[in-house]
Image: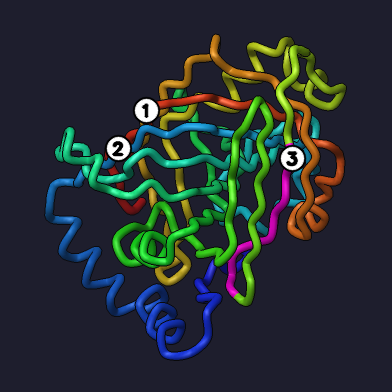
């Protein structure tokens, strides 16, 4: 299992303090002991400009990313790896209501695999999460087990006239590098490797975008964190994209082809609960 340890990209006292906070087993243990006895603070964000990049990869190529006992969704030795990048819309406590407009709107990129879960509960495994805010990135480490994130010093995600440009530069930190350029297109067609897994565009989009839960590996205690989420994507509003993407991480897992991509203009994202399994 690959380590997901946090490394702050800025050296010096600030970086050292951030690393100690984000990686402190004692702090995490205290937070778990306290927050496990309190009601979960539901979170909300009016997410926009969500770009999905998806690749069909060999299960063997991503096996090192999967915790023991977790079962990947797969067909004939193939599974799907997804990078979705978006702009938050005032990410904060749901109870704040209109006052949530006072909360910031960081950029985020989630890197994930899909699980073969029981029943209708579509679940993903978070492999990497990247934010453009050091406060948010360290905060996810201190206050959450289901969203262990990394901070990228240079992170852009822009949308203009149907074009989406994304760049993640980790500097000296633990975030992965990523670049993507995508353009809106009117073609709703599945690439051959996805057509081998799904019967139609609609079926593939529903599978890739409609999830009810996410898990992440808490390596300090060798356990899984489980979060229930609400992501009511309007499938009719999904926009097909043509994209080019590059990352050393993608090379390692054999995701070298152009991604199957699409955009979701807006969605009301909610985190409903979190617990350790």
Earlier sequence position, callout 1 versus callout 3: 3
- Residue in the picture at 65% in, 40% down: 82
Pinpoint residue 137: horizontal percent, then vertical percent.
Answer: 42, 62
Real-space Cα distance between discs 2 and 3? 28 Å
- Disc 2 or disc 3, which is closer to the eye? 3
Magenta-span inclusion, residue 255: no
* Residue farthest toward the front in the current orientation of the protein: 161
Disc 1, SS = strand
Q: Which residues, given as a range, are shown in magenta?
A: 173-181
Real-space Cα distance between discs 2 and 1? 7 Å
Magenta-span inclusion, residue 176: yes
Tag 1 and tag 3, C-beta contact below 8 Å: no
Residue on which the image places disc 2: 44
Earlier sequence position, callout 2 versus callout 1: 2
Real-space Cα distance between discs 1 and 3? 25 Å
Please tell me whether residue 91 is drawn above or below residue 75 in the rendered image: below
Q: How many C-alpha atoms fall within 10 Å of the one at disc 3: few (<14), some, or many (≥20)? A: some
* Residue farthest toward the bottom in the current orientation of the protein: 13
Residue on which the image places disc 3: 181
The dot on residue 268 is: 1
The dot on residue 24 is: none
């Amino acid at each position: 299992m690959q380590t997901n340890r946090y490394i702050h990209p800025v050296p010096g006292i600030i970086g050292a303090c951030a690393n100690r906070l984000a990686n402190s087993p004692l702090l995490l243990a205290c937070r778990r002991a306290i927050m496990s006895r309190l009601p979960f603070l539901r979170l909300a964000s009016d997410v926009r400009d969500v770009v999905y990049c998806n690749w069909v990869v060999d299960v063997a190529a991503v096996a090192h990313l999967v915790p023991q006992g977790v079962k990947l969704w797969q067909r004939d030795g193939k599974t799907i790896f997804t990078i979705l990048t978006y702009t938050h819309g005032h990410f904060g406590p749901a109870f704040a209501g209109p006052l949530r407009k006072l909360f910031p709107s960081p950029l985020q990129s989630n890197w994930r695999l899909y699980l073969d879960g029981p029943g209708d509960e579509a679940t993903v495994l978070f492999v990497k999460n990247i934010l453009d805010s050091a406060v948010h990135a360290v905060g996810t480490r201190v206050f959450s087990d289901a969203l262990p994130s990394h901070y990228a010093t240079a992170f852009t995600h822009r949308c203009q006239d149907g074009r989406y440009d994304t760049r993640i530069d980790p500097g000296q930190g633990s975030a992965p590098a990523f670049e993507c350029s995508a353009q809106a297109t009117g073609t709703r067609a599945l690439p051959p490797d996805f057509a081998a897994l799904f019967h139609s565009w609609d079926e593939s989009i529903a599978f890739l975008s409609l999830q009810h839960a996410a898990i992440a590996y808490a390596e300090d205690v060798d356990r899984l964190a489980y979060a229930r989420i609400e992501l009511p994507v309007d499938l009719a509003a999904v926009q097909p994209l043509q994209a080019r993407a590059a990352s050393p991480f993608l090379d390692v897992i054999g995701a070298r082809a152009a991604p199957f991509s699409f955009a979701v203009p807006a969605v009301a994202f909610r985190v409903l609960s979190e617990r350790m399994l």
